[in-house]
Image (cartoon, rainbow, N blue to C red):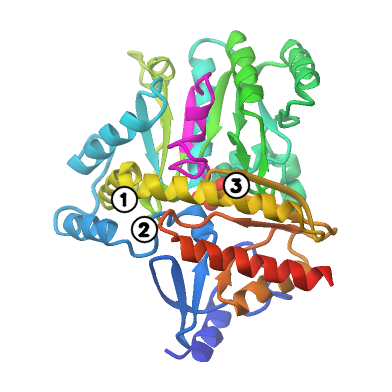
Amino acid sequence: MIASELLKKDAQHIWHPLTQHKTALPPLAISHAQGNYLYDHEGNKYFDAISSWYTCSYGHVNPALTQALKDQVDQLHHVVFAGMTHEPAVRLSEKLLSILPDNQEKLFFSENGSTSVEIALKMAFQYHFNRGEKRLAVVALEGGFHGDTFGAMSASGLSVYNGPFEELLIEVIRIPAPTSENMEIVLQQVEQLIAENDIASFIYEPLVQGAAAMQMNDASGLCRLIRRFRESGILSIADEVMTGFGKTGSHFASSQIQNRPDIICLSKALTGGIMPMAITSCTQEVYDAFLHDENSRGFFHGHTYSGSPLGCAVAAAGIDLLVSENIQEGIKHISLSHAGFLDQLKQHPAVGDVRHCGVILAFDLAAEMQRYGNERNLIFQWFWKRGVFLRPLGKTIYLVPPFTTTAEELKFLYDTILEFLDSRAV
Ligand SMILES: *Cc1c(COP(=O)(O)O)cnc(C)c1O
């Protein structure tokens, strides 16, 4: 189908996510993708500088992942995961638990980041309920993003789009993300919150708050918060849907924080962008709180496609890639290059704040801008025309390139960014 025909039919039939269809530009039609590039119907190629929302970290249509999918396709596509199990799920579990922080013992499967968060929140509520405690409040970080289902949306501090639902949300108390400057004040605030509320859990994006325009928070601050909450029996939930699988330099951001979370949410790069899948992991202690002769103490939550054999097979192959020498070298190289480029960016008159963590690089333009406003769209188009796909968030431009990005490709990205900045500085 030619692109114009495709767009016409798209407009007839499809309601896109996060889109105001009255004012939005027509979508871009992508015909295929390969490695680090997207291709349109005219054969133009675009470097995927955000790994398609942080999913395809090993490059698009990665041969090892494709092969894992093909192998599984001939075996078993789907089976009920309540009362049944299968080899790909067990294979994935062993691999994943061998790289997760070592206090994680059990895995609960679902299909997307929001449900992994929903499950984490429900696990924490019921953990307390099963122990005879009524705890109904959640503590979350300001500016956090955890997804679009009700619980996840409630925990998200970016409430600009939550207006119609505000009165329906669960009770969430927000604290500032810890930094070396505000730590003592935040800890005081937390003391008071603990004294005045029955808090079930503390949810946070470790090290990098993605949707808050890649705001970076302090590992030692989070470490102290986790410890303080633990002292009061409050479960910590690390939402690693974005940060998981190598993006912060380590396999998980939580690996860089000494105190371990009780629960971890995973999705996005879990399957390298091939299958929608998510996992909520937890400690033995959390799991044990659901063991009882009474059925109702169990966790009665389930999604039809839980533990998809296809997803599990691909995710297991993804972990093999993640721990491979090639990919680990790639992560190190990108991280080091980013650090060098950051020094250059800092000097530029058109640039405000700059930050970097692993393969994630972000900088603010020295200007005020709406999150998805007109000027932001013009920047998007400027880069698109030069063969780079990135999605600025307001005045923040950020890169989360695939781990397979080469030195030449990084140079191309950096040069394109500098060209853009120079065009603003004059
Ligand atoms: C993307 C994201 C989610 C939501 O995941 P979906 O798969 O889009 O539902 C939750 N938390 C974080 C940190 C995310 O980046």
Residue under numbered circle 1: 311
Give the residues drawn in magenta, as a range.
241-265
Q: Position of residue 196 (x, y in %)?
A: 77, 13
Residue at image x 47%, y 29%? Answer: 255
Q: Name which residue type carries label 2.
A: Ile
Type of amino acid at the residue the image marks with label 3: Ala
Find disc 3 in the rendering and name its residue: 339
CB within 8 Å, label 1 to label 2:
yes
Instruction: Kindly state the secondary structure of the residue where label 3 is placed.
Output: helix
The residue where tag 2 is placed is 274
Q: Tag 2 or tag 3, which sits nearer the N-term?
A: 2
Asked if 142 appears above or below 65 in the picture, the reply is: above
Q: Give the label, 3 or 2, closer to the camera.
A: 3
Whole-angstrom CA distance, mark 1 to mark 2, is: 8 Å
Q: Which residue shows up at 52% across the image and 47% down it?
A: 335
The first of marks 3 and 1 along the sequence is 1
Q: Amino acid at mark 1?
A: Gly
Taking 347 as reference, is 209 left or right? left
Image check: 33 left or right of 83?
right
Q: CB atoms at circles 3 and 1 under 8 Å apart? A: no
Distance, label 3 to label 2, CA atoms, is 30 Å
Please tell me whether residue 240 belongs to the stretch shown in magenta.
no
* Residue nearer the viewer, 337 or 7: 337
Question: Is-magenta flag for residue 259?
Answer: yes
